[in-house]
Every structure is written in structure tokens, then in C-alpha cells.
Image (cartoon, rainbow, N blue to C red):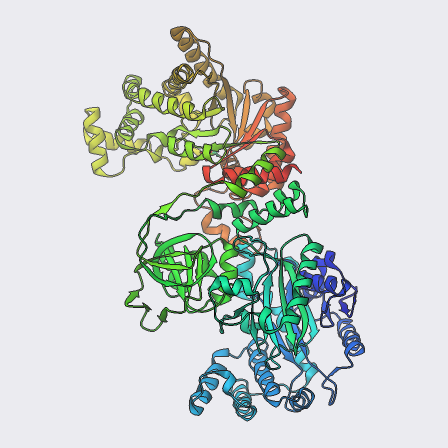
Amino acid sequence: TKWVYTFGDGAAEGQAGDKNLLGGKGANLAEMCRLGLPVPPGFTITTEACNWFYANGRAYPEALSAEVSLALDHIAGLTGRKLGDPVRLLLVSVRSGARASMPGMMDTVLNLGLNDRTVEVLAADSGDARFAYDSYRRFIQMFSNVVLGVDHEVFEEILEDEKAQRGFELDTELSADDWRAVIGLYKAKVEEELGNPFPQDPQEQLWGAIGAVFSSWMNARAVTYRRLHDIPEGWGTAVNIQAMVFGNMGDTSATGVAFTRNPSTGQRALYGEFLVNAQGEDVVAGIRTPQNITEAARIDAGSDRPSLEKIMPEAFASFVEISDRLEKHYRDMQDLEFTIERGKLWMLQTRSGKRTAKAALKMAVDMAAEGLISREEAVGRIDPASLDQLLHPTIDPKAPRDIVAVGLPASPGAATGEIVFSSHDAEEMKALGKKVILVRIETSPEDIHGMHAAEGILTTRGGMTSHAAVVARGMGKPCVSGAGSLRVDYRSGTLMAMGSTFRKGDVITIDGSNGQVLKGAVPMLQPELSGDFAAVMEWADAIRRMNVRTNAETPADARMARSFGAEGIGLCRTEHMFFDGERIVAMREMILADTEQGRRSALDKLLPMQRSDFVELFEIMAGLPVTIRLLDPPLHEFLPKSDEEIEEVAAVMAVSADKLRQRTEALHEFNPMLGHRGCRLAISYPEIAEMQARAIFEAAVEAGRRTGKPVVPEVMVPLVGLKKELDFVKARIDAVAAAVMKESGETIDYLTGTMIELPRAAVRAHVIAETAEFFSFGTNDLTQTAFGISRDDAASFLETYRQKGIVDQDPFVSLDLDGVGELVKLAAEKGRATRPGIKLGICGEHGGDPASIRFCEQVGLDYVSCSPYRVPIARLAAAQAAV
Ligand code: PEP
Ligand code: MG
């Protein structure tokens, strides 16, 4: 095995296609070298070495150290520099880099190779003692924190004290001698904390840093990030070691990050930020507020701090040229990191940039128009799950706005919530069902939990590329960053804006599209799905084979789903139509009646309500298919619980509360989800199915007359395991259909089918298909019954399963392809064998999950059905699955 890949000076052992082995950063550094771009020479230790490290008790493969030495010789060959050399000193950066980018989650060490002796070499070499000492103190701080585990606050405290003693405000006011004094204190502190002096040997430093980067793959925040983004632990991280270039060598040096297009809006314009006389971490950490790269962006932002274009026109020009070239080469928007050392530009990273859903759509549509990519590729560029961001509300432009501050529009969308000042509080309040806005001076990777729990994020420091901004955009959460006029005081738990003070629990609204922070809750508008969104959806619709329906029973949901592009209803859960007001009472009356007579009289009350519900749904769906499922509740969901409820039903039924209580107890089940539900109810009490069938067919006649479009209802029988169950219920449905046709004098076309949601039904699908005219896979129950895991209780242990690596994903969210998927596939094949062309769909939650949708395409289902908000996601995912 080869563990180390070198790059530099127009050549590289790796290339862009080697992401799995070299990580994204390493593969792209190699590619940039191959393109002849200015990249500091270096080498990448592979992700396989990381995996070896973990498989062998955190040890290194034997050959690694010799390969690293050769790679250092390679750098020496190109630069003439060596670690620890008394004249031609080499310093290196050591950075992580996994296959998928995990911004800020893992560790980095810069300026490695400095010690008490080499700092003098650096001072002589650069002719700038102040720079050399500043670099050394940065190194001590970073190395001690990342490799030795010393809290970085202790260094901040020392630095603050020293500045205060000298009456300084800014780090830049410290002289070489001041820094030398700080270094003395830093080293003493390290020795005090660890009992050992700060390591002076560059080799020891290097291997310490390599080990720390590998180890950071398993740190808590990286583990959390991977879990949130479904990144497998087995990928590992690579380590990139490169000759240092310095953005902190005075006023002709700088460092920055940029996107080739605006990551928030998608606008085609170079967009980025930089800091003069700084190192990369200063920009990302959001400690100093950075400047705009282009004049246009500076003017746009109304900033009076000069742009890179203005102050370093030559470096700017080569940067513009390189960014254009990289975008064309990768055929995608690039996220770039660069450093300018005394006027010379160096590229440190390129990768496909993270973007908001809105920007992704605009870029895809623009790039297709520019001829950079095809329409298929454009459709493939959008992460279906990200569309969710667009479906969220924005602030009503007509609403009055009580603006208390304006920061940067770091991640679009608006959010309202109660203020919390810590990630811990955010999680706690969220658990209580509250909506919160996480307010921080700046966020760090430790805040990822809290950001996840919050509706939106507000920071008072940092730019558009600060941690908070990048992570929020990735999560699709509204974020306002760098709202510098706000003062956060964690200790007293207050947020001060000009003139007003907010405390924890006070409600604010943030608008991540324009950076505004508003007092109180503000009226919101539903999103408009036109423009780029509509274009991409249209292209997707042209590509996909499967239909997309919705799971809906209320007119509001059905209308919403139609506006999102649903092509019918795949599941109308009729039991959900009985939860409100007088209906629940009639429903309870029906369930609790102990005679057929009693049930029929309650059902007579329910019939007209059901019928008018169905008429409305049929009308909204205007001729599109509508699948209505017969009653499928676990009975306990409907039983009256409180004394009040029991008395209410008793009064209607004219029986005593005691008698009713007894009846309720008699209906109690130990395992309601496996109890008297689904078709079992229709078999015990056929009059229920008959009432529902009558409501469906009468409604079909009426809606057909009203709209002039014939309605073809699909009547679905739930929880079938035996063909005879379906035969029994279908006979009742057919009898009612015949009766309604006779009464109305109209013919009704209808289909009778079943859910496939029990393993027995899947296995016997060829037999069930003799009766069933369609199948709809109820993968919620099928997952529950195939695994023998209760869908209502699984949350308590599935998380443990995930943490212990037993499952990668919650099988109730993303279909378990190996097990449950096999059952679906088997049933589809068996169903088709009996009834070629049998209509097949899915209506479990998985119908809105992109990975599960891909599987449905492979199995050849006719449609997926999902909740209204997931319809656009499903349309796009179905198109991506089809190419
Ligand atoms: C299912 O089981 O997948 C299904 C759609 O039905 P329900 O969730 O109503 O049980
Ligand atoms: Mg079910």
C-alpha cells in the first residue's frame, strides 16, 4: 500500500478523482497542481492510513514514516527548505480533509516547525522579527490546543492581560519584544499545565499533529456532524501537509476565502472576503470582520474598508483568472481559499461550494443556460432534501418591522423564536416544544447541536463565511451573522440593542435574507414557487417516470399538495377525518356501541360528513386518482380517556358512564398496533366498511356530476395478511358499489386494492393479487412488522443502535433496502406475475425520502406518495432516480 501522495510545482501523484483516498482537499490540491496553478508543495497521507490507524489501536502503518520522510525530501527538492534547517527553514501546515467537507469539525495546525531556535531563523529569513514571533505564539497556541489538549482560553487570558498592562486594544499593537514576552508566558503555562515543556523537536511536532488530525475524526463534534449529514465513520480523514505560505507577513500579505458565485443567492459574481496581514483561521473564526474581495461587493455592502481589487490589483487579477478557470474546469461553483504572501498569490483549496437551495437552483438554471452543464445535470445538481428550505415562510413585506439591528444575510429564510444564549438551552427548550433563536457572539463547532435545535441563528461577530454562516446554510436554517451593534452578555443573559434589552425567552425574529433582527413575532408569507424553482421542477418532471402523489385527507393539505405538483392522492387516511368536534363523539359512539343497531345509528351520523369530505377531495383533485383507505385505527386512539369525555359519549348514547367505562376497558388492548385494526375492524364490523364505501361512491357520483370529470376512486383495504380477508371486505365494497350505481343510475369505475404492509402479504402477494387491483406499500407498518420493532417505541433505542454502529440510519426514515426492500421487491414481482400491469405505489413515510425513492424507481413502482411538503422533493428525487 502507498500511504503518501505528493504534489507541487505543476505535478501531482493524485488527482480530482481520488477523493475517497485523498479526501476532498487532498484530491483537489493535486488537481490544481496538475492544472499548473500556484499551490504550495506538499503531500497527502491517505484516508486508508487513517482507517489503519483506528483498526490498529491508533498506531501507524510501518512504512508510513519512511514515506513521510521521502515526501519531505520532495518538498525540499522543490523549495530548498527543510524542517529545522538553520538557514533554509521549512514550516508546514497540517490539515484534515475527508471525502465530504466537514467545515471546522476537525483539526488544523499551522506554522509547524517553529521552536526557540527556528523562530530566529524565520525572523532573519523574513527580515521581520515581529512576524516571526507572532507566528511562533500562534503555533504554540494552536499546537497546545489541538495536539496537547490545553484549553485555548488560557492563552487568550494571558494575551488579554499583557495587552491590558501595555494599554493596547489590538493584537497588531504588540511589538516583537511584546510577543517574545507573551511566548515566554505561553511556554511556562504549557509546562505548568502538562508537566512537560513545549516540544521543540520538529519531527515530534509533526507526528503529534498527524496523530491529532487522525484523532479529530472521532471527536464529539465530528461524530455529531457525520450523524447529521449521514457521513459514514468508515470513510476516515486524510492529512494534508504543505509548505507554509504566510498571509501575515505584513501589509502586502493577506488571506481569504471566496466563492465563484454568490452562495446565498446564486448570483454570477465572484464573492468573498479577506483580511490583510492575517492567517486563514482569522477569517474563518470570525474574530476580525473581513473585507470584500471585489469593488462591486464592497459598494453593495456599503463598506468603507477597501476591497482586494483596490489594494492588491495584481494578486486580485490572477485570483479572478484562476477562479474562472477552476469553475470551468470543475463545471461547478467553487469555494476557494487563498493566501497572498508579499504580493504573490497561492491557492490553498478548491471544492464545490456549499450553497443555499435558492442559490443551487439559480446556479443550475444559469449554468444550463451558459451551456456549462446539461438539463439532466442541472436537475442532478440539486439536493432534493434542500428544497425544504424554499418551502418555508418569509416575512410578509407588508408587515410592520421593528428592526433592532442589521447584520449580514448569512443564510436565507425567516425565523421567529425565543432567545437562548447557549446550545444547551437551545436543546432543552426545543425538547419542551419551544421554538428558539440561538444568539451567540460567534459560534464554534461545539454549537452544532444547538444550531440544529434552533429555528435560526444570530451572531454578533463574523462574516458571511464564518462558522455560523457556513453551517447554517448547510442546515438550511436562517442565520444573521455579524450583527455588530448588538451586545451579548452571557453572564447576565441579556442581548442589548440600541435602546432595548432582551432576555432569555423574549421573542425575536431574524430575516436571514436581508440580515434584519426584529422585535417580536412578525407575520410570514408562504413561499412562491416560481422562477428557477419552477424551471428545475419542469425539467425534473420531463425526466421522471414515476408519478408523485400525496398523503392527504384535509382539503387544505390536498390543495397545498396540488400547488406543490402532486398528481393525485396516494393515501387518504380516513381515520384522521374523525378527530374533531362532533365527529369524534359519533366515532366513539360507533366504536363503543355493543350492538349492530347501535353502530348503524352512529354510522348514519358519520355518513354525510364522510361523503362531503370525499366530494371536496375529489373536486380538488379534479379527475386525478384518489386512493381512499378504509378505517385503520388502532382503536385505542379513539377511546374516550377522561371522565369528561366518557360522560359526553354516555349522554349521547343514553347509557350510564359506568357502563361505558366497562366497555372501554373491555376494548383495551395490550398491543394495539398489532390488535384490532385495519381490515380486522371491517371483518368484525362490516357495517363500518359499508358506510365508508357508500360515502366514497356517492361522493364519486356527486363530484363527477359537479366537475364533469368522472372520478375513479381507488378503495384501499389496510393491514391485509390473508387473501380471504381482502375477499371478505371486497365483497362488501362491491355490493355497496352495485347498490349506489343502481340508485344513481350511473356507472362508477373503481378499483379495489390493498396495502402491502405485513410480511405475510408480501410473501403471498401473488395470491392476494388475484383479488387486489392495486398494491400500495405501507412501509411504515412493513418496517415495524419485518423488524418486529414498534414504530411508536423505536426512538428510545434506535439512537443507541446508531451510536453503536448497529444501524446506519433509522429504518423508519430511509427504507431498509436489504430487508424491507427485499419484501417490497418480492411482492412487486409476485403481484405482477399474477396480474401483469397491476398498479404499484408506496405510501409509507419513505415515499418522500430520496434514497427510498431511488429504490422505488429500481423496483419499477408506478408512483410514490408522500406528505404535501415533500412533494417537490419527491418530484426531483424521482427524476434523479430515473437518469
Ligand atoms: C404504512 O403503514 O406505511 C401506512 C402508510 O399506513 P399508516 O402509517 O397509516 O399505518
Ligand atoms: Mg399502516
- Residue 531 in the image, given as x and y percentages of width and height: 52, 42
Compared to 298, does 586 lie above or below? above
* Closest to the observer, 715 or 75: 75
- Residue 840 in the image, given as x and y percentages of width and height: 57, 27
Q: Is residue 50 left or right of residue 360?
A: right
Q: Is residue 696 left or right of residue 259?
A: left
Residue 88 figure quarter: bottom right
Residue 543 figure quarter: top right
Instruction: Please tell me which residue is depicted at 36% across the width and 70% down the height of the picture.
Output: 488
Residue 227 figure quarter: bottom right
Compared to 386, does 179 lie above or below? below
Residue 431 appears in the picture as rendered: no
Instruction: Please tell me which residue is depicted at 63% across the width and 39% down the height of the picture.
Output: 881
Q: Is residue 206 left or right of residue 692?
A: right
Q: Quadrant of the N terminus?
A: bottom right
Q: Quadrant of the C terminus?
A: top right
Residue 355 appears in the picture as rendered: yes
- Residue 871 in the image, given as x and y percentages of width and height: 50, 37
Instruction: Please tell me which residue is depicted at 60% across the width and 45% down the height of the picture.
Output: 365
